[in-house]
Amino acid sequence: MNKRFICIVLSITLVSFLLSAALPAGWGKYALTIKNNTHTKVYVKLEAPKAYYYFKINPGVTKKYTIKSTTYKATFWGCYSKKIIKKWEVNRKYKILFPVCNARDHGNEMGVLRIIFPQNDDDD
């Protein structure tokens, strides 16, 4: 009886471990950090069939969110401009960085989405 009980407990423990290793952390949700280095408010809208997010970040502020893992249509506003990414696959944690308006450096950091807005004559 004791051997049977021990086998059942070990089997349940093994199955639990294997299931937890197979599932992504947060059950398909990932961390999103948005950093606004511009002098304007920035807005982020993420649209997917079963997920929708809208964020507003003030100048000089960094915010952290948790979003669902899926493919989004992403729209960004800032520096008096708008930028759209028609398909943005979120399958890991990301950082969205809004550099100063009219930035030229595109960077290449892994996991960092840099949103560069075009030159605008209204900026001084």
Image (cartoon, rainbow, N blue to C red):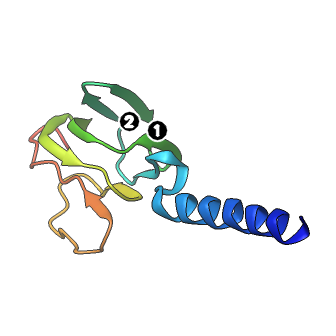
**Residue 101 in picture, x, y percent from top left:** 24, 51
Residue 76 pos. (x, y %)? 24, 37
- Image-based side of 15 in relation to 59, left or right: right
Name the residue at 18% across, 54% down: 116
Q: Is residue 21 left or right of residue 81?
A: right
Q: Earlier in the sequence, mark 1 or mark 2?
A: 2
Check the image and name the residue furthest to the right.
2
- Under circle 1, the secondary element is loop
Rendered view: 67 above or below 53: below
Kind of element beneath mark 2: loop
Q: Amino acid at mark 2?
A: Lys
Q: Are marks 1 and 2 in contact (CB under 8 Å)?
A: yes
Quadrant in the picture for the N terminus:
bottom right
Near-viewer residue (96 or 16): 16
At 84% from the left edge and 63% from the top edge, which residue is drawn? 5
- The image quadrant that residue 105 belongs to is bottom left
Q: Residue at x 29, y 74 (%)?
A: 109
* Label 1 to label 2: alpha-carbon separation: 5 Å
Which residue: 29% across, 33% down? Answer: 46
Picture coordinates of residue 77, whole percent (x, y): 24, 34
Circle 2 packing at 10 Å, graded few (<14), some (14-19), many (20+), is some
- Asked whether residue 62 is in view, the answer is no
Total count of labels: 2
Quadrant housing residue 114: bottom left
For residue 122, the mark is none
The residue at which mark 2 appears reads as 41
The mark found on residue 58 in the picture is 1
Q: Is residue 85 left or right of residue 48?
A: left
**Which kind of residue does numbered mark 1 sit on?**
Asn
The local crowd at label 1, few if under 14, some if 14 to 19, many if 20 or more residues have their Cα within 10 Å, is: some
